[in-house]
Amino acid sequence: MSNGNKEVLTGHQVVANAMRQVEPDVVAAYPITPQSEIVEYFSQYVADGKVDSEVITVESEHSAMSACVGSAAAGARTMTATASQGLALMMEIVYIAASMRTPIVMAVANRALSGPINIHCDHSDSMAARDSGVIQLYGEDAQEAYEFTLMAQRLAESEDVLLPVMVTLDGFTLTHTAQVAELLPDRAVSDFVGEYDARYPLLDVENPTTQGPFDMPDYYFEHKLQQVDAMDNVPDRFLQVQEEFNDLSGGSYDGLFETYKMDDADYAVIILGSTAGTAKVVVDELREEGKKVGLLKPWLFRPFPAEEIKDVLLDKEAVAVLDRSLSFGSSGPLYLEVSSALSGEDTKPRLYNYTYGLGGRDIKEDQIAEVFEDLENPDLEDKMRYIGARQ
Amino acid sequence: MASLETLAKREEKKRKFESGHSLCSGCGLPIAVRTILNSTDGPVVASNATGCLEVATSRFPTSAWNIPWIHNAFENAAATISGAESAYRSMKKKGKIDKDVNFLAFAGDGGTYDIGFQSLSGALERGHDFTYVTLDNGAYMNTGIQRSSATPKGASTTTAPAGEEKYGKQEKRKNLTEIVAAHEIPYVGQASISHLQDLADKAEKAIHRDGPAFLNVLSTCQLGWRIPPKDSVKVAQKGVDTCFWPLYEVDEGEHNITYEPKEKLPIKEWLEPQKRFAALFKTGNEEVIEEIQEDVDEDWEKLQAKAS
């Protein structure tokens, strides 16, 4: 179907194509409101015989993740896709999927959580899963969402990782807009992802395993620490997978986050997802005016590359962290991570937190330019600022 | 019907479900599970909802299960096994597996009638080839005997207790066997731990039938029912002989009563030995027992009409 050509596709189509090329044994999904078209496109590929997968059209997102756990534990390569309320509903089982070390790859089209019901983009859904034990990758555009979906497969199934991976892409901004995307040839992808060989599959009936047993206080703690170890192995594995992916695609992934004009920057913004694209335009414009500004865009949010990010930020004058979700009664989730990364350092940049884009509120270039302008003020008050909100 | 000798011989084979678990003495669950697992020689993969059976058989690092077994959460035994069964079909089609494997799900009444109902209904409708077993002891026994929609009218539980004003649960229980039968799946069976041959036959049919099958098994709980452990099977037998819990099946849509009590006993004989119904025997509650008798009579007549 694809021969490595550039095509104009929506984010949904791009992720569905990545799933088609991975050809999982099982996909289980449910169309909660808001629904992601990823599974619709994928189901059409199945109906047209373009991919050989079982699609379980379950009766809820809770059952979607439950069936994914059953499938992955059975030994099948397993994927799902969801958004917003769907992720919230499956949350109980997302934790279990991580604890059972099932390497499920899931796409999350980032959309606001109710209430009020909204359906448009923000990061409140995936941020609610940040402590669940899943690996989280944030894509800036459809191309990254595509490439992360392929890399996620390898990362999830790495022997010393075996964790679910969530690949997020901004709802509507990326999922519903058509962009030029370059898909790899089908064959190259199947070679890259290889065959999944589960270590202790339920379907190995001659060697029965008890999975998901009951832990008393004498074992629970140690089992959680095994998840900690697995998470700690992620950065190195991710870099290794990137390297192999670059060989295949000619790409240039070489880190846990992207830096844009950061080397000599005095002022920086940190942004996840599609808004980083807007920020790059602003950085370019301000650079033309001679301002030393830059952008840091985390790809990996869980585990959070604190040390590596700290190293990039320490010599900056001031940094603004732009969060697209709230943690009521506290600062934004991304800000908290960055702030924690810089804590204990004597010399560090002034750090500020902004919230933007909740419920799909647009953020424009001039608003990001204003953030950079704020940063130049050494007396800027340290308080949460809400970009573009009527107050 | 499987002879007692046959059932005994099955016990001599390698056990799929081992002793050494921590279920209570007098508990009906292991009786049901062993009889069901003994009913097939082929490989079986089982999911298990959170509950007594899961907690008492899988305490890490021990396990009573000699079959591949998965516990996921409370409400999703059906969805979980539907995932494993789909994995099996997918991988078999691709030639990654060559064996024939059967799939089972075990859950209590709370995990089925209440919180797991949607997951069960969805899996039945999707037509997965699996057998779902409800081990119905009529309340959330694992968490301390809270009322479920399977709790019989008149039973005292910790969340619908008998007190100065109330005798216990006011409402009639949900008829889940008929609700499942309304999904028009190939096989539905209602059985009891008091009638092992009947249970074994139903399990054999359910497991080997293509498509979804369902077993609703009356299972005693000495703590929740407040009965002496030694009377467990006897009390379950009373449930059957009073027609509170008729033994029957819905085989390809046909209702068959698989056990007709020689003499249908009055409902008092089921209620009286169980202290959870004690309040019904206080002066002033005679009417409630009559109402329960009427409900049982009416349901039995309806069932007989369906089976005729």
Image (cartoon, rainbow, N blue to C red):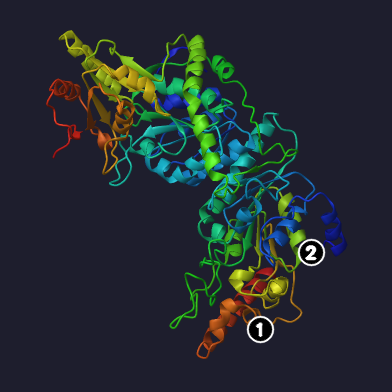
Horizontal side, residue B6 vs residue A267: left or right: right
Q: Nearer the viewer, residue A83 or A180?
A: A83
| Amino acid under disc 1 | Pro
Q: Nearer the viewer, residue B163 or A31?
A: B163
**Residue A189 image position (x, y, % from top left):** 54, 17
Query: Residue shown at 69%/55% (left/top)?
Result: B21
In which quadrant is the N terminus of chain B drawn?
bottom right
Kindly tell me whether residue B50 is visible in this rendering. Answer: yes
**Residue to which mark 1 is pinned:** B266
Instruction: Tell me whether circle 1 and circle 2 mark residues in contact (CB < 8 Å).
Output: no
For the residue labelled by badge 1, is the local secondary structure a helix, a strand or a loop?
A: loop
Q: Are marks 1 and 2 on the same chain?
A: yes
**Residue to which mark 2 is pinned:** B197
**Residue A223 image position (x, y, % from top left):** 55, 40
Query: Residue shown at 62%/73% (left/top)?
Result: B302
Q: Nearer the viewer, residue A284 or A301?
A: A301
Which residue reaches farthest bottom?
B283
Kindly tell me whether residue A28 is visible in this rendering. Answer: no
For the residue labelled by badge 2, is the local secondary structure a helix, a strand or a loop?
A: helix
In which quadrant is the C terminus of chain B drawn?
bottom right
Indicate the chain on which mark 1 is placed. B
Q: Is residue A337 above or below residue B299?
A: above
- Counting residues from the start of the chain, the first of labels 1 and 2 encountered is 2
Residue A329: quadrant of the picture:
top left
Q: Is residue A37 above or below residue A211?
A: above
Q: Is residue A229 above or below residue B208?
A: above
**Residue B56 image position (x, y, % from top left):** 64, 56
| Amino acid under disc 2 | Gln
Indicate the chain on which mark 2 is placed. B
**Residue B304 image position (x, y, % from top left):** 67, 73
Residue A253: quadrant of the picture:
top left
